[in-house]
Amino acid sequence: MFVVSRLLTHVGKLPPMVQQLGYINRGLKVTVVGSVGGIGQPLSLLLKLNPDVSTLSLYDIKNTTGVGVDLSHINTRATVCPFEGKDGLKKAMDKADIVVIPAGLPRKPGMKREDLVDVNASVACEVAFAASAVCPGAMLAFITNPINVIVPIVATILKAKGTYDPNRLFGVTSLDVVRAQTFVANILNSDPLKVNIPVIGGHTGRTILPILSQCDPPFKGTDEERQALIQRVQNAGTEVVNAKDGLGSATLSMAFAAARFVNSLIKGIKGSEDECVVECAYVESDVTEAQFFATPLKLGPQGIEENKGLPDLDDEEQKSLECMLPILMESIEKGIKLGEGMMTSCV
């Protein structure tokens, strides 16, 4: 069964039921690329707690061994395997089921996520090349900013390498959902875990669109309160950057949201007849004019099982969507062009 499930993970040709049985009977290998950083360390800690992770592989440029030894003392199932240096990336990712990537330069005060493209595009490129070589069937979950550009870069490279599966490439936008749930719950004086609100679009500024009309329990604020709430969700990253006064960006909340997303991927992989696993993420999509777009997704053994599409929008949300699309499409076009240009420069 171990051999069968391994073959399926990396080739994806066996029947879904065989795949599901294989995954149920073994643990999963999860790789964290950028495991020493401000997001990577707490994210690795949270993933170490998941009983379905049998191997937690850590990668960073340096200092990975110390983090790995520290985590290895925790009495949970996952075996921790640290790797570092340029030659360590492929070793860390080899035969991984899930690769989550928080690596990259974080924002500083005055910076926009788009300002990180030049530095962080190279991270995306290296991971895409490594995934194509050693784990072409893995699910790739990118946290590296700017997500709106990074995911199209990776998709373009994977397509050129012949290893692209749109159901297995994700830009992690869960933090936008987590923030929306928290901010709404604070206003309603309710439990954030019981707030359900879809957040669609992208992962920066006006491309982040919380759909308050579909909030459960209902949000019944005034137009001014509604607009203030939307803007707070859209600018929440800057709120953290400014509050840390140059000492970092959103690390702990991002790690929490990313762990939640990876844990949902794992639930989808393991399969459950009793639970429908749905998360919002930025993926290749045909629900709007934008080639990549975040919407609620049903997750399953092969990644995206169903794109739930656009939730019902009220008139104001429809206008916001129309205003957002040109901004998002410009980022996507930039990402595709960067990906095409990096095919020979990132080996």
Image: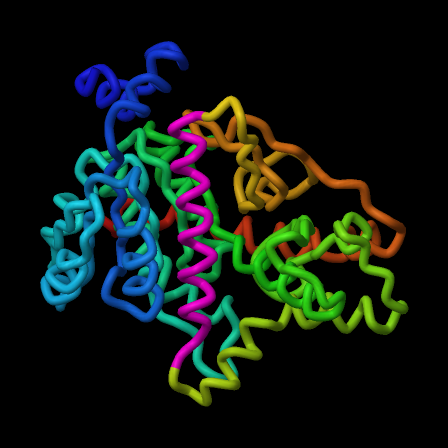
> Does 255 sit above or below residue 172?
below
Residue 265 drawn in magenta:
yes
Residue 122 visible in this rendered orientation of the protein: no
Image quadrant in which you'd find residue 221? bottom right
Residue 98 x/y as whole percent: 32, 40
Q: Which is nearer the eye, 242 or 212?
A: 212
Residue 181 x/y as whole percent: 64, 59
> Going 19% across and 42% down the picture, which residue do you hit?
55
| Most common SS among magenta residues | helix
Residue 290 drawn in magenta:
no
Residue 328 x/y as whole percent: 62, 54
> Going 34% across and 49% down the picture, which residue do you hit?
100
Q: Quadrant of the N terminus?
A: top left
Residue 22 x/y as whole percent: 29, 19
Q: Which is nearer the eye, 337 or 286?
A: 286
Q: Which residues are magenta?
A: 248-271
